Image (cartoon, rainbow, N blue to C red):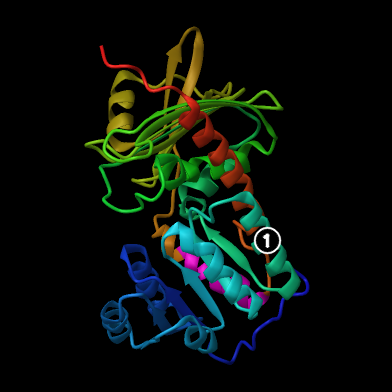
Amino acid sequence: MTDSPVSNPKSPFRVGVVGAGSMGKNHARIFSGLEDAQLSAILDERPEVAQEIAAKYQAKAVANLDEFTAAVDAATIATPTVTHFAIARYLLEHGKHVLVEKPFVETPSQARELCDLAQKHGVVLQVGHIERFNPVLPALEARLTRPRFIEATRLSPYPGRSLDVGVVLDVMIHDLEIILHLVRSPWVQVDAVGVAILSKREDIANVRIRFQNGCVANITASRISQDKLRKIRVFQQDAYLSLDYQNQSGYLLRLARDEEKESSLLGKLLGVAADATIVTEFAGKRIVREPVEVEKIEPLKRELADFVACARAGSQPKVSGREATAALELALEITRQIEQTPTPAPP
């Protein structure tokens, strides 16, 4: 973003939050603690909620979008998806840097219009795909060569929020964006299934995606599970990586080098218990299981700090509007297939 306006590093960089629901409250909390930003404004359709959050973090509760726009240099939008486009368009047209929570917008045409507006006005447009800021992802990227098969699973209890969209746009889209980023090849085939259980839209879904370079991804998402689980497994020619987004941990399985000898039985037992490197025989091969070192940190804090840094410097964010548009297009193809699948008749 070479034409982006660069802010004066000595002046306070004013940020604000539109939408003071569960996610917006977290945005306000983190912005209030960032050294390079000053939380200046909170806007919500419930004035009493805006007042409460603003008072807690020494910001100002504003009454409308005009007042909000005048009070900020950058903003995050954490409102229902149907409102994202209009709010983001207004802010971008007024030269404000914008982070939109996912799902980005309702349609790819809306997404492309916002991307074009950001480019026209030389401002940052970022989308809140928070898992790109999970510290397990750099650990995966550092060991990635050419993924051949990817399996992602994301399970959570019924949320009671974000029910304006199904589980694909609410939950699975995190994995879709990450996998598009990792594979870096166009998708050529999508086979999706999904079922609505507790809401009007799909609550559980599975999709198999084939990419032009031969990689295949299998993704499962559910928001009606009793357990929470967020994992990704990547198989490539020389290794298998298993990473846990939730616990920010993981391990790598790879072929042993010549000097790496099989661990003793005691070494294997102690190694598994201590999450240390062990070498074992399997199918005539020596296999090394080694932990993946991850520096644990709150992903949302990394995401918002990166947004502020990009906005101040006029640099490209990790998840720009363009990357988010590609994920949205894939997610909408998956939901289209699910909606067109006939519901099985009762026995």
Residue 19 in the image: x percent, y percent?
A: 39, 70
**Mark 1 secondary-structure assignment:** helix
Any part of residue 256 in sight: yes
Q: Residue at x 28, y 23 (%)?
A: 266
Q: Residue at x 55, y 59 (%)?
A: 127
- Of 278 and 19, which appears nearest the observer? 19
Residue 206, quarter of picture: top left
**Quarter of the rendering occupied by the N terminus:** bottom right
Q: Residue at x 42, y 62 (%)?
A: 300
Residue positioned most to the right: 2
Residue 110, quarter of picture: bottom right
Report the span colored magenta: 302-313
Residue 10 in the image: x percent, y percent?
A: 59, 92
Q: Compared with residue 269, is residue 12 higher up or lower down, i.e. above or below?
A: below
Residue 123, quarter of picture: bottom right
Residue positioned most to the bottom: 11
- Of 246 and 63, which appears nearest the observer? 63
Mark 1 is surrounded, within 10 Å at the Cα level, by few (under 14), some (14 to 19) or many (20 or more) other residues, namely some
